[in-house]
Image: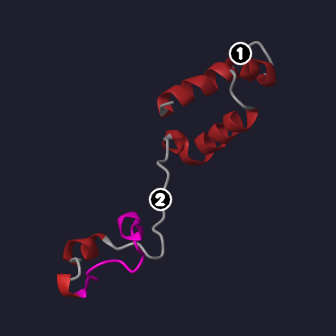
């Protein structure tokens, strides 16, 4: 829902003849969501109703973007010639 739609919804519920709980049940919106939107509207004006994109935290062993650019695969001389675990063809 956009912030303008949230604002209209809050005004619709406030202007409803029904009590808040019944009006929210009619629109299938949880009370906690309505009151959270209302508090954000009160504290931060209409900008508070804007959707926030989830923040994806970087894991401890993730390369930074500039590190990915300079990362190179190891030279072929460092790679083992074959694995120590026998394959099915070698078992026969």
Residue at position x 61%, y 48% in the image: 43
Q: Residues within 10 Å of mark 2 (few under 14, many from 20)?
A: few
Residue nearest the viewer, comparing 37 with 61: 61
Q: Is residue 75 visible?
A: no
Q: Which residue is mark 2?
A: 56
Residue range (magenta): 78-92
**What count of labels does the image hold?**
2
Above-or-below relation of 85 to 49? below
Q: Is residue 27 magenta?
A: no
| Residue drawn 48% across the image and 57% down it | 55
Q: Observer-nearest residue: 70 or 5?
A: 70
- With respect to residue 72, does 51 lie above or below? above
26 sits left or right of 56 in the view: right
Front tag of 1 and 2: 2
Cα–Cα gap, marks 1 and 2: 39 Å
Quarter occupied by residue 91:
bottom left
Rendering coords of residue 82 (x, y %): 30, 78
Question: Can residue 3 be seen?
Answer: yes
> Which residue in the protein does label 1 denote?
16
What's the magenta bit mostly, secondary-structure-wise? loop
Query: Quarter of the image containing the C terminus?
Result: bottom left
């Amino acid at each position: 829902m956009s912030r303008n739609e949230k604002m209209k919804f809050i005004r619709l519920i406030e202007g409803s003849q029904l009590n808040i709980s019944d009006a929210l049940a009619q629109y299938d919106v949880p009370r906690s969501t309505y009151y959270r939107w209302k508090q954000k509207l009160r504290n931060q004006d209409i900008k508070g109703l804007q959707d926030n994109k989830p923040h994806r935290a970087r894991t401890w062993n993730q390369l930074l973007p500039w590190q990915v650019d300079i990362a190179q695969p190891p030279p072929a001389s460092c790679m083992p010639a074959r694995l120590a675990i026998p394959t099915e063809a070698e078992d026969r």
